[in-house]
Amino acid sequence: MSYVQIDRLSKRFKETTVLNQVSLSIEKGELITLLGPSGCGKSTLLRCIAGLTEVEDGGKIVVGDTNITQLAPKAREVGMVFQSYALFPNMNVYGNICFGLKMKGVKKEEYKERVERIIDLVDLRGRENSYPHQLSGGQQQRVALARSLVVEPKILLLDEPLSALDAKIRKSLQTEIRRIQQELSITTVFVTHDQEEALTVSDRIFVMDHGNIVQIGTPKEIYAHPASEFVARFIGNYNVLKRAEMVQLVGEIVMAGDAFAIRPEVISLVPRGNEASAQSKNGWSVESVVRSMTLKGNVIRYEVETNHQKMQVDVLNTSDNHWIRVGTPVFMRIPAEECIPLQ
Amino acid sequence: MKPNKVFHASLITIVMIYLFIPLVATFLYSISTDWYRTILPEGYTLSWYKELFTDPRFLDAMQRTLFVCFLAICISVTVMVPTIFIVTVYFSRWERTLQGLVMLPYAIPGVVAAVGLIKLYSSGPIVLSGSIWILIGAYFVIVLPYMYQGIRNSMRTIDAIKLVEAAELLGASRMQAFWKVIFPNILTGIIVSTLLSFSTLFGEFVLANLLVGGHYETMQIYLIRRMSESGHLTSAIVVTYFILLFALSGIVMRLGKSSSKEGSR
């Protein structure tokens, strides 16, 4: 049996269903991500696990052997890191970190070593006496993490913990959170709307939409095999074509599926005049024209137009890939094995 | 100096002169022996202040005012802080109702409130008319808007709901979350509201005069009564009164500044 079992959890706010009979299970020591757009119910699910939001009758949350559905937040033994950190402004870093231990009645002699260890783990040595307003966003987030971890919770809940930070710090903290999680082997639920973040940190991703879990899988599975149009559009910049659009683009196809997803990086562009190299055994070459070009750093994103529709194509930005000018007629080469059929 | 700046500077100077001349004149009159025929007083003395501070009536009135204000504000803090905390954190849908309720005293003129209170409490199960309790009760009501706004704003600034949730998840009870996390962080807000209420009550005359009047001579009533006796003495009272209020406002502004600095960090 899995370590965390969530069974048919529902939540309604007046007439709006925020969670619709959600069931999921998490293994011990696993980091799962709840990924979805704003309003999909991911944060509500997290708050239900924490006991900060009541669930409708019939739902059940079991952690280990304990049914925690009706327990008060303080009795659940869950740690939570909020998006806004929620550090106590009147306490310094040390005070914030040992608050939970004091509340649980742990004696100073006993918790001193634990607090010191966690300060080292989150790399806050030397900042113990600083107050939250004297710390940077990244440091505040580390304090919030340390404060939740030091009480040794059964599950750690992270509610969009990095969304208020700038891109560079966010990336380094993603790696750090993953390192700490693996070092402590703590079962973790991470909520985010950033697909790149989800792909970076997770063991498994649970994609949510309108209060339902629409796909579960490892980052690789989710990215390479989106199960639906929603997942394909949300997880990457997939070109999603209805069956009729696909037929218009490449002619008759034998594959089953109502729609098809094609990743922009699997399509290649061959300038007209190089028709021979544009031919491929297992795929299609489509005549088209480059309509726009955007430099994204490591890739160049082209918007390419055929007679029927516009497609996005990503080309690696290397010195031997010459930039194709807007208005250039090209062949778009689409490998058949990279067309993912969707339900 | 640019012509625009000259205009601004002279405008401000005129306004300042307009505001300060009465104060300066009152102060000079309070330390003058005679001031009838000359531009400046003919002689200076502190005897009016001496008379004032040795008058047992003045000291009694001051004590009474301090007592009534202090008691009303104590009751207000004791009632309002937990109420606002509970409504903000646990019953947020009642917030608008509470806000509407505490803002009512703004809308009701003092005279109307006084007449209503006298009528209500002069007979029936609770008779309070003429006693200081009716004044304390009325004072409790009129400071509600100041107390509510100040305390509510500090709770909003610190995001009290999230802090309580964080504290509870770390094993704190609701009481512990309030005392150890919320209270220390809203303390500045409470002090500012308290001082603001205090300076409002200290200058309040209508309710004091109509509700207790001669039974219980407060500072304001004393001031009005002595006004007819000697202009110099009245000026001394007014100056003392101003210095007290000025000191109070200074403390409020200092605390307000430091709390807004903390909030913006």
Image (cartoon, coloured by chain):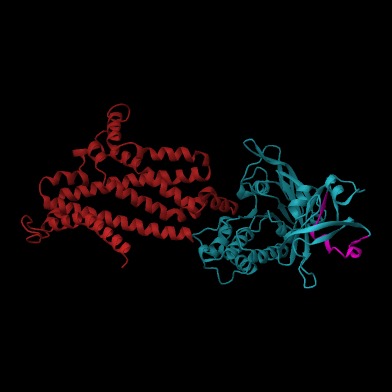
Chain colours: A cyan, B red
Span shown in magenta: A260-280
User: Is residue A199 in view from this perspective?
Assistant: yes
Kindly indicate the quadrant of the structure image that contains residue B15.
bottom left
Q: Is residue B101 above or below residue A188?
A: above
Residue A262, percent across and down?
82, 54
User: Is residue A3 in view from this perspective?
Assistant: no
Residue A159, percent across and down?
64, 54
Name the outermost residue toward the right: A281
What's the residue at 27%, 32% (across, down)? B115
Q: How many marks?
A: 0
Q: Is residue B74 above or below residue B252?
A: above
Side (left or right) of B152 relative to A265: left
Side (left or right) of B117 relative to B227: right
What's the residue at 57%, 50% (across, down)? B165
Frontmost residue, A266 versus B209: A266
Frontmost residue, A284 versus B132: A284
Residue A329, percent across and down?
81, 60
What's the residue at 73%, 52% (across, down)? A234
Q: Is residue A61 above or below residue B192?
A: above
Name the outermost residue toward the top: B124
Residue A63, percent across and down?
72, 49
Q: Quadrant of the N terminus of chain B?
A: bottom left
Side (left or right) of A249 relative to A86: right
Side (left or right) of A238 relative to B87: right
* Residue A278 lies in the magenta stretch: yes
* Residue A227 lies in the magenta stretch: no
Frontmost residue, A330 versus B36: A330
Name the outermost residue toward the left: B37
Q: Is residue B262 above or below residue B136?
A: below
